[in-house]
Image: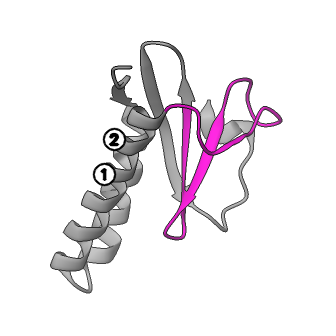
C-alpha cells in the first residue's frame, strides 16, 4: 500500500511556527530538531495510516497522536492525512480549536 499524501493545514503550520519560535528563544538547534522530529512523526502517520486515538467528541473523524508533550490532531481518508493542529498535550481542547 502506498503512503497517503501528507497535507498540513495552515493552522498546523502556524502551530509549528509558534513551537519553533518559542524554543528558538533558548536554542535554535533544539528548535530545528524538535520541529523536524514532529514533521517526521507526521510523515510516519501518513505511512502507517490509522493510528492514534479517535477524538470524535471534539470533531467527527478527528484523531490525535500524543508525541513529545505535543498532540498531533489529524483527519485521514484513503488519499491523504490532513494535519489540522499541533498543540501542547496539556492544553484543553474544544471544537473551537478546529474552527
Q: Are marks 2 and 1 in contact (CB under 8 Å)?
A: yes
Of all residues, the one furthest to the front in this rendering is: 1
Tell me residue 79's x, y (percent): 42, 13
Of all residues, the one furthest to the left in this rendering is: 29
Q: Is residue 99 above or below residue 26?
A: above
Q: What is the number of the mark on residue 43? A: 2
Tell me if 71 is positioned left or right of 23 in this view. Answer: right
Residue at x 49%, y 13% (from the top left corner): 78
The answer to which image quadrant residue 1 occupies is top left
Residue at x 61%, y 34% (from the top left corner): 98
Q: Is residue 85 above or below residue 10?
A: below
Q: Is residue 53 above or below residue 17?
A: above
Tell me residue 76's x, y (percent): 54, 24
Q: What is the number of the mark on residue 40? A: 1
Measured in 3D between alpha carbons, the distance from the residue under mark 2 to the one under mark 1, in whole angstroms, is: 5 Å
Give the structural element (helix, strand or loop) at label 2.
Answer: helix
Q: Mark 2: few, some, or many residues within 10 Å (few <14, many ≥20)?
A: some
Magenta segment includes 60: yes
Q: Nearer the viewer, residue 70 or 49?
A: 49
Q: What is the number of the mark on residue 84? A: none
Residue at x 58%, y 33% (from the top left corner): 50
Q: Mark 1: few, some, or many residues within 10 Å (few <14, many ≥20)?
A: few
Tell me residue 17's x, y (percent): 30, 55
Residue at x 23%, y 69% (from the top left corner): 33
Magenta segment includes 69: yes
Q: Which residues are magenta?
A: 49-74
Tell me if 97 is positioned left or right of 7 in this view. Answer: right
Q: How many marks do you count on the picture? A: 2
Give the structural element (helix, strand or loop) at label 1.
Answer: helix
Q: How is the image coloured?
A: one colour
The answer to which image quadrant residue 62 occupies is top right
Q: Nearer the viewer, residue 30 or 92?
A: 30
Amino acid at each position: 500500500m502506498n503512503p497517503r499524501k501528507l497535507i498540513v493545514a495552515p493552522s498546523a503550520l502556524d502551530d509549528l511556527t509558534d513551537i519553533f519560535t518559542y524554543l528558538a528563544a533558548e536554542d535554535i538547534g533544539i528548535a530545528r530538531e524538535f520541529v523536524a522530529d514532529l514533521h517526521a512523526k507526521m510523515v510516519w502517520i501518513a505511512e502507517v495510516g490509522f493510528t492514534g486515538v479517535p477524538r470524535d467528541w471534539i470533531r467527527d473523524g478527528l484523531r490525535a497522536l500524543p508525541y513529545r508533550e505535543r498532540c498531533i490532531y489529524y483527519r485521514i481518508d484513503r488519499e491523504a492525512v490532513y494535519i489540522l493542529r499541533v498543540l501542547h498535550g496539556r492544553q484543553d481542547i474544544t471544537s473551537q480549536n478546529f474552527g
